[in-house]
Amino acid sequence: MNPAALKAKLEDAKLRLSRAESVMEQALRTIDVGALQEKSMISAALGSALAEMKAARQDLLALEKVIADE
């Protein structure tokens, strides 16, 4: 894959991550389910997924920097 195509894929991945993060953050703020235990389980799962997405974003940014420096 040529550098331009790789950069385009990185930009697309960053955009998709950003959108997903926004949706998940909003869901965490507005979660409204019946049982408290269920709410805690859903919040924990969303929180974990959000943390993983943020880590992936950092990896993408680091990779983009390496590519830009070459």
Image (cartoon, helix red, strand yellow):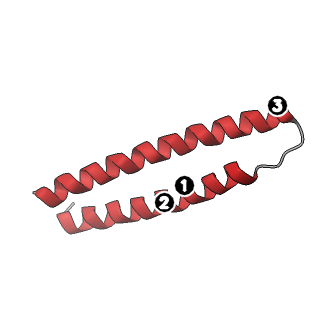
Residue 31 placement (x, y as % from top left): 76, 49
Q: Label 2 vs label 3: CA separation? A: 29 Å
**Quadrant of the rendering where the C terminus is positioned:** bottom left
Dots 3, 1 in contact, CB < 8 A: no
Tag 3 secondary structure: helix
- Which residue corresponds to mark 1? 21
Tag 1 secondary structure: helix
Residue situated in front as seen by the camera: 35 or 29: 29
Q: Return the mark for residue 37.
A: 3
- Check disc 2 and give the amino acid type: Ser
Residue 26 placement (x, y as % from top left): 66, 56
Q: Return the mark for residue 18.
A: 2
* Crowd band around label 3 with a 10 angstrom C-alpha radius: few (<14), some (14–19), many (20+): few
- Check disc 1 and give the amino acid type: Glu
Residue at x-position 61% and y-position 53%: 25
Q: Relative to residue 65, is residue 50 depicted above or below?
A: above
